[in-house]
Image (spheres, grey):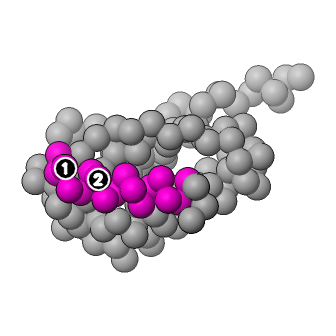
């Protein structure tokens, strides 16, 4: 029983542009129980860099955590069309990361996933990125 309570009940992972507002989410910010994984991405980050960093840093940590369910905060301000941020992700990147998270959920937690739309500042990027995300959630 003591082992059950020895780890925190929450694992948090984030990919985001850094440095950028609000200035939080440093790679070194791992939480007291090492249950936080931040993947700060440089301005101009493209698909290749995004996927390699996520594959190396975020996905293995999430797999090791063995979550009971996954909540996706689906933000699209990293979309190449977004006028405020400086990341260059395309619709296929949002599809890819969603499928990766779905695969982890299928092996770790019987496919239990909740997705919450977070935002983005390009209506076109938000529409096409969200469509790619939903297609991946549906398994298409």
Looking at the picture, how far across and down is residue 72, in whole percent? 50, 42
Q: Is residue 122 magenta?
A: yes
Q: Quadrant of the N terminus?
A: top right
Q: What range is drawn magenta here?
A: 121-137
**Which residue is label 1 attached to?**
123
Q: Mostly what secondary structure, the magenta segment?
A: helix
- Image-based side of 76 in relation to 57, left or right: left
Query: Farthest residue toward the right?
Result: 1
**Which residue is label 2 attached to?**
127
Q: Is residue 41 magenta?
A: no
- Image-based side of 106 in relation to 40, left or right: right
Q: Quadrant of the C terminus?
A: bottom right
- Image-based side of 123 in relation to 91, left or right: left
Q: Secondary structure at mark 2?
A: helix
Asked where in the image residue 49 lies, by quadrant, the reply is bottom left
Q: Give the crowd class for mark 2: few <14, some 14-19, many >=20 residues within 10 Å.
A: some
Looking at the picture, how far across and down is residue 45, in whole percent? 26, 67
Q: Secondary structure at mark 1?
A: helix
| Nearer to me, 71 or 4 | 71
Q: Is residue 42 visible?
A: no
Write the residue at 29% across / 53% down.
Answer: 127
* Marks 2/1: CA–CA distance: 6 Å
**Marks 2 & 1, CB-CB < 8 Å contact:** yes
Q: Is residue 126 visible?
A: yes
Looking at the image, is 133 positioned above or below residue 24? Answer: below
Write the residue at 66% across / 28% down.
Answer: 9
| Nearer to me, 109 or 36 | 109
């Amino acid at each position: 029983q003591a082992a059950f309570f020895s780890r925190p009940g929450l694992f948090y992972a984030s990919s985001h542009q850094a440095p950028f507002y609000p200035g939080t989410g440093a790679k070194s910010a791992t939480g007291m129980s090492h249950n936080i994984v931040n993947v700060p991405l440089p301005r101009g980050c493209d698909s290749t860099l995004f996927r390699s960093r996520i594959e190396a840093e975020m996905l293995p940590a999430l797999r090791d955590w063995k979550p009971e369910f996954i909540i996706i905060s689906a933000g699209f301000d990293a979309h190449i069309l977004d006028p405020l941020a400086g990341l260059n992700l395309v619709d296929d990147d949002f599809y890819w990361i969603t499928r990766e998270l779905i695969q982890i959920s299928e092996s770790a937690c019987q496919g239990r996933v909740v997705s919450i739309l977070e935002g983005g500042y390009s209506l076109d990027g938000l529409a096409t990125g969200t469509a790619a995300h939903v297609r991946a959630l549906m398994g298409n």
